[in-house]
Image (spheres, grey):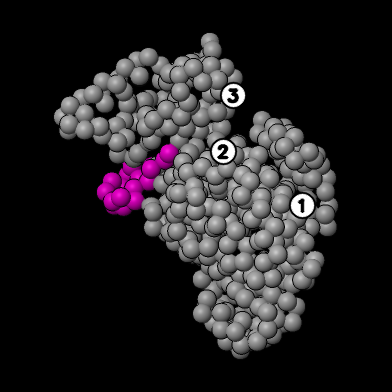
Amino acid sequence: MLSFTFPGQGSQRAGMGRPWVDHPSWEVVEEASNYVDRDLGELLLDAPMDVLTQTSNAQLATFVMSMVVLDAVERLGLFPAACAGHSLGEYSALVASGALSLPDGLALVVERGLAMQEAADAEPGTMAALLGISDEDADAACRRAESDVWVANYNAPGQVVIAGTLEGIAAASEAAKTLGARKVLPIPVSGAFHTQLMLPARARLRKVIESVEFHAPEIPVVANVDARVHTDASEWPGLLSSQLCSPVRWRHTLETLAGRGASLLVELGPGGVLTGLVRRSVPDVKGVSVAVPDDLDKLIDAIAGADEWAASHPGEQGEHLYTSERVVVAPAPGVFEPDPALVALETSALAEATASTNQTPAGTPAARLMVGDRVGTVGLTDVRTPFDGLLVRWLAVRGERVVEGQPVAWVRSKGS
């Protein structure tokens, strides 16, 4: 089963947008620039690292880069079964799931970066990674410091990030060494993120959170604060607000995704840190990073390999058998019309299933599709599926005006 993850602040790199300039998905940068009234292309192409490391710039640049990569993957017709994002990446996951629109996601990310920068300027702090230490001992090291320092990220077994004042980090680092930490690596940031020192940022961000519209996620999203899936739109404002001052439970998030049947975790955005954490936290799950266009071919190869393995090992994973969720996208802009034969078949199958059960069944598949089958038209252009599988449901309705690359149908392909 395919799941998407999205990186947070610290993954940004100078010039990270350059490989994408000639890709069709670069139009996301232009769209986002219009929403925030800023030349984001310059930020992604020409900004030096000292500019990109500023919290307000780092978060915006990382978020937009993840949106470019997401768009490119969606153009391949790939559709995840679940999403999650590390810290800032949670906003990317919510946009990917349909819980937030791109404009609202941008508005929140811009305000979050500014609010966290302001809080860090008012109360300077920093962060450090503790390697080779348990979660419990990392927490104990913070308590022994008798200062303002807390666990900020539970990233993987033996890898915990702490955050606090300079004095607190120094004291907790020494305590961690006495408790068996193999290494203590300072993280070059100016704020104690995901701690009580971010309370002023939380108050400022909450005002903007209240002004945007949340929707029920179309794809399950696992939250940072409790590593649980939340499908109720009304829960996400509080979760995002709490996230600023709560530790990121990333190891637990990966375990939740694996427990839901994830067999391939795809990191969408700059860097590849989260992919490395997959190997440490859930070694039975494969991780793939998509950061540049060339990585798209690696992703297709990884999916094909997983499909072939599942087909050759029937029944070995039970409910965890690899399932690829994919979408058929519009090849051109125009008005979408579903194929009448598929609509008729879907209606017939639904009526037959209803008659036999005396109730309307959920998720009755409409048809089995083969590569090249027509699923509809956009204007005078045929929309054909590049995948074999079952037509799960329509993602565009008859007469809807769609843009190029917009998903119109959801197809499920399962090894058999």
Estimate how packed mark 1 is, as few (under 14), some (14 to 19) or many (20 or more) residues with alpha carbons within 10 Å: many
Say the numbered circle drawn on residue 135.
none
Q: Residue at x 34, y 40 (%)?
A: 415
Residue placed under numbered mark 2 in the picture:
73
Toward the viewer: 396 or 254? 396
Whichever of callouts 1 and 3 sits on the residue coming sooner in the sequence is 1
Residue placed under numbered mark 1 in the picture:
57
Toward the viewer: 351 or 22? 351
Q: Quadrant of the C terminus?
A: top left
Q: Secondary structure at mark 2?
A: helix
Q: CA distance from mark 3 to mark 2?
A: 16 Å
Q: CA distance from mark 1 to mark 2?
A: 24 Å
Q: Is residue 371 left or right of residue 287?
A: left
Against 311, residue 50 (above or below) is below
Question: Label 2 amino acid?
Answer: Val
Q: Quadrant of residue 176?
A: bottom right
Q: Residue at x 62, y 50 (%)?
A: 209
Per the rendered image, the range of residues in magenta is 308-325
Whichever of callouts 1 and 2 sits on the residue coming sooner in the sequence is 1
Estimate how packed mark 2 is, as few (under 14), some (14 to 19) or many (20 or more) residues with alpha carbons within 10 Å: some
Query: Does the CB distance between marks 1 and 3 fall below 8 Å?
Result: no
- Residue 9 appears at what percent x and percent y? 68, 57
Residue placed under numbered mark 3 in the picture:
403
Please say whether residue 313 is one of the residues in the magenta stretch.
Answer: yes
Q: CA distance from mark 1 to mark 3?
A: 30 Å
Question: Label 1 amino acid?
Answer: Asn
Q: Is residue 84 left or right of residue 184?
A: left
Q: Mark 3 or mark 2, which is nearer to you?
A: 3
| Residue 322 seen | yes
- Residue 35 appears at what percent x and percent y? 72, 37
Q: Is residue 81 left or right of residue 86?
A: left
